Amino acid sequence: MMPYDGYRLYQAERPKSAAEIRQADRQAGQLAAAVARLFRSITRTRRVTPAQRRDVQPQVSCRAAEPATRY
């Protein structure tokens, strides 16, 4: 057992005041909101507007077709 484990056990087992419980809940909510924002920003799909679709030119290959057989 580490030297500070006794204090950690005391903190975990002691009764918490209403203010301490509210503070812990507030911190847990803020952490959950931050994780949700990060997840949404990573997984957000980028929408293409009609104006952006008009700007995109189809890619056309300019290469001439090669003959099937060479002599």
Image (cartoon, grey):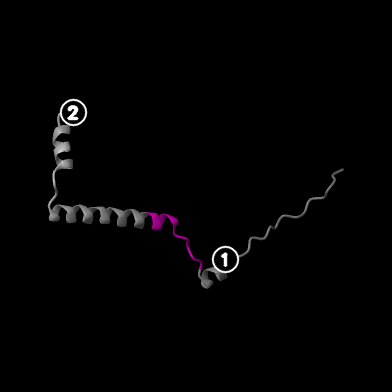
Whether residue 42 is in magenta: the answer is yes
In screen coordinates, is 46 left or right of 59? left
Residue 27 coordinates in the image, percent (x, y): 22, 53
Secondary structure state at the residue bearing disc 1: loop
Q: Pointer 1: what residue? A: 56
Quarter of the figure with the N terminus: top left
Residue 24 coordinates in the image, percent (x, y): 20, 52
Q: Please report the residue visible at 42 percent of the width from the left and 54 percent of the height from the top.
A: 42
Q: Please report the residue visible at 18 percent of the width from the left and 28 percent of the height from the top.
A: 2
Asked whether the beta carbons under mark 1 and mark 2 sit within 8 Å of each other, the answer is no
Residue 66 coordinates in the image, percent (x, y): 79, 50
Q: Nearer the viewer, residue 56 or 50?
A: 50
In screen coordinates, is 23 left or right of 71? left
In screen coordinates, is 6 left or right of 36? left
Residue 3 coordinates in the image, percent (x, y): 15, 29
- Give the amino acid at mark 1: Val
Whether residue 20 is in magenta: the answer is no
Q: Please report the residue visible at 14 percent of the width from the left and 49 percent of the height from the top.
A: 16
- Give the amino acid at mark 2: Met
Magenta-tinted stretch: 39-48
Determine the residue located farthest toward the top in the rendered image.
1
Count of numbered badges drawn on the protein: 2
Determine the residue located farthest toward the bottom in the rendered image.
50
Asked if residue 12 is positioned above or below residue 34 in the image, the reply reads: above
Q: Pointer 2: what residue? A: 2
State which quadrant residue 13 falls in: top left
Q: Please report the residue visible at 13 percent of the width from the left and 47 percent of the height from the top.
A: 15
Q: Nearer the viewer, mark 1 or mark 2?
A: 2
- Please report whichever mark, 1 or 2, sits nearer to the chain's N-terminal start: 2
Q: Residues within 10 Å of mark 2 (few under 14, many from 20)?
A: few
